[in-house]
Amino acid sequence: MANSRRKQMTRLLFKTALIELMQNKPFHKITIKEICDQADLNRTTFYLHYVDQQQLLDDIINELKEKTAEFISTTTYKGLESKLLSEFLDFVKENSVQYRTIMFNDTNGEVGAVILTDLLNDVYDKWPVFGDSQKNEYVYAYMIDGVKSIICKWLDNDFNMSSHDLAELIYSLCYHTAQSFPQLPTGGNR
């Protein structure tokens, strides 16, 4: 048990060190030596836990995805999509250091897309079918990237809009995007 706690604490120190370093430096330029110096631990200890910097970053990302999934699974909103978005934005604000670090260093957009897709899946079920599943894939990708960009802008602007107001804006933009497509009969392919 004590060994498990020690392992968790060591990993936390490495994660914190990488997040702190990523506040001022792009991930791809951060060395293992810098991570170890920041964590005040040695390279041997690093290699006991991680193969390289990417594995450490993946650990941080997976932890954030798990926290986000846990948040989503415990949130009930009963059809009030903007309330869900507002609560999610509050969650982002509470975890802003991790979200800033991940979202701003997510060069290919994968992490933000995965996190937002999990969040918005319930909302999408209520939106119209845009045609075949291929069209849906493109429309949803457009909306996810838009929402991700809005959240990044909000993080970058130090939360200059309330979570509630931003949630209303996001929902309105997504809803109107969905409504701009002609409705298809129920039972179309998603």
Image: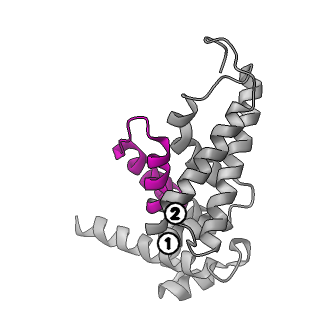
Q: Residue 15 carries which label?
A: 1
Residue 77 falls inside the magenta stretch: yes
Residue at 54% over, 83% down: 36
Specify few, some or many for label 2: CA neighbours under 10 Å numbering under 14, 14-19, or 20 or more.
Answer: many
On the image, the x and y values in percent for residue 145 come to 71, 49
| Amino acid on which the number 2 mark rests in the picture | Ile
> Residue at the location (74% across, 43% down)?
142
Q: In this view, does 3 lie above or below 33?
A: above
Near mark 1 (Cα within 10 A), the count class, few <14, some 14-19 or many ≥20, is some
Is the residue 187 above or below the residue 141 in the image?
Answer: above
Q: Where residue 60 is drawn, which disc sits there?
A: 2
The residue closer to the viewer here, 132 or 47, is 132
Q: Which stretch did the figure color magenta?
A: 61-90
Above or below, 160 against 130 in this view is below
Coloured how? one colour
Residue 110 can be seen, yes or no: no
Quadrant holding the C terminus? top right
What is the spatial separation of the Cα atoms under label 2 and label 1, in whole angstroms? Answer: 6 Å
Contact between marks 2 and 1 (CB within 8 A): the answer is yes
Amino acid bearing label 1: Lys
Task: First in sequence, mark 2 or 1: give its number.
Answer: 1
Magenta: main secondary structure equals: helix
